[in-house]
Image (tube, rainbow, N blue to C red):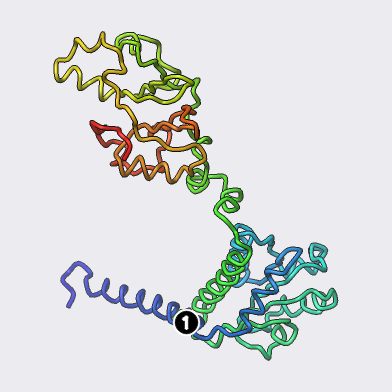
Amino acid sequence: MDDGHGTSHDDAILDRGRAILRAEGEAVLAAAAGLDQAFCRAVRLVEGCTGSVVVTGIGKAGLVARKISATLASTGTPSHFLHPAEAMHGDLGALRGDDVVLALSQSGETEEITRLLPHVVARRVPIVALTARPDSSLGRAATVVVPTGSVREACGLGLAPSTSTALMLALGDAVALVTSNLRRFSSEDFAARHPGGSLGRQLMLVEDAMRPLAECRLARADETVRAVFGRPLPARRTGAVMVVGEGDRLAGIFTDSDLARLFERRHDDLLDAPIGWVMTASPTTVPAGTRLRDAVAILESRRLSELPVVESDGRVAGLLDVVDLVGLVPHEAIHAPQPRHHAAA
């Protein structure tokens, strides 16, 4: 019964949304259960490709093909999308003998695809087909058919590509990611292909994001707190002083929070004491060569604002400051109070 706020209407919307998700999900699960040696042959063709995996499709299948091609390229398999209609007007020249074609068509009889097939076959380029019908024109021309099976579209009319395209996308991802695994594609390889955005930053090394020594606040253990904090600040302000000893090895750290605690506890006399007396010795550090995402995890879990980066011999290399990492560290971690102890675990 409607309570005047559209509750019954919302229930109907939710029911329909859940039904669509179930229909698409069940189709993917059925495909997973039905994978056979054809999938293995398709993966081996893609893995063994010495050129590019050329992915093609038209309409909604074409949009899925573009995404599959992007996934292949970003996970270690050279790939590009070929528009089947444009291929007939010159773009066919992008197809080489050492390529593999991955063609998407639920019916296997899409006009633009069937017109393209003889030209691919004439070039003796292997074809992997994602189609519901192995006996279709596409299926007969293909080297390997990975069947999508006959599915009912989740569209209320049973017409708009939905279940079929979800299934094609999942199968394309499976081919791409299994191939990536066989190629022993590493996180370093992934980082090299994703240098931009938040993802790229997380895959960077700490050296790529840290403040170099020239932009850090450094002190010797025998310098007084007053002398250290009386010096001009670097261009980019940081709340930490790294205390270095012989050979520029990190001896400790002293932060703005440590300074504030001296005042809170009325230890003003310690302002003229050596900073080595009041620093945190053996602070939490991160080795050079660490992934930035792992350093961010340390900052978050230990509620730190600064993290020294050290070389294998203990020399200080730079400093990670949380204010430089906005977007990688949760808001609550950025604004967390500095802990009393910065000591290593």
Q: Residue at x 40, y 77 (%)?
A: 20
Across and down, in percent, residue 162 comes to 50, 76
Q: Residue at x 49, y 38 (%)?
A: 206
Across and down, in percent, residue 303 comes to 29, 39
Q: Establish if 340 lies above or below 1.
A: above
Q: Which quadrant holds residue 233? A: top left
Q: Residue at x 52, y 40 (%)?
A: 289
Q: Establish if 10 lies above or below 79.
A: below
Across and down, in percent, residue 100 comes to 73, 70
Across and down, in percent, residue 38 comes to 63, 83
- How many callouts does the rendering have? 1
Q: Residue at x 31, y 73 (%)?
A: 14
Residue that badge 1 annotates: 27
What SS does tag 1 mark?
Answer: helix
- Tell whether 90 sits left or right of 12: right
- Tell whether 63 sits left or right of 15: right
Q: Residue furthest right?
A: 122
- Tell whether 41 sits left or right of 151: right
**Which of the pair 101/337 is nearer the observer?**
337
Q: Which quadrant holds residue 37? A: bottom right
Q: Establish if 192 lies above or below 313.
A: below
What amino acid type is highlighted by mark number 1?
Answer: Ala
Q: Quadrant of the C terminus?
A: top left
**Which of the pair 254/28 is nearer the observer?**
254
**Which of the pair 295/286 is nearer the observer?**
286
Q: Which quadrant holds residue 174? A: bottom right
Label 1 CA crowd tier, 10 Å (few <14, some 14–19, many 20+): many
**Which of the pair 336/140 is nearer the observer?**
336
Q: Quadrant of the N terminus?
A: bottom left
- Tell whether 210 sits left or right of 79: left
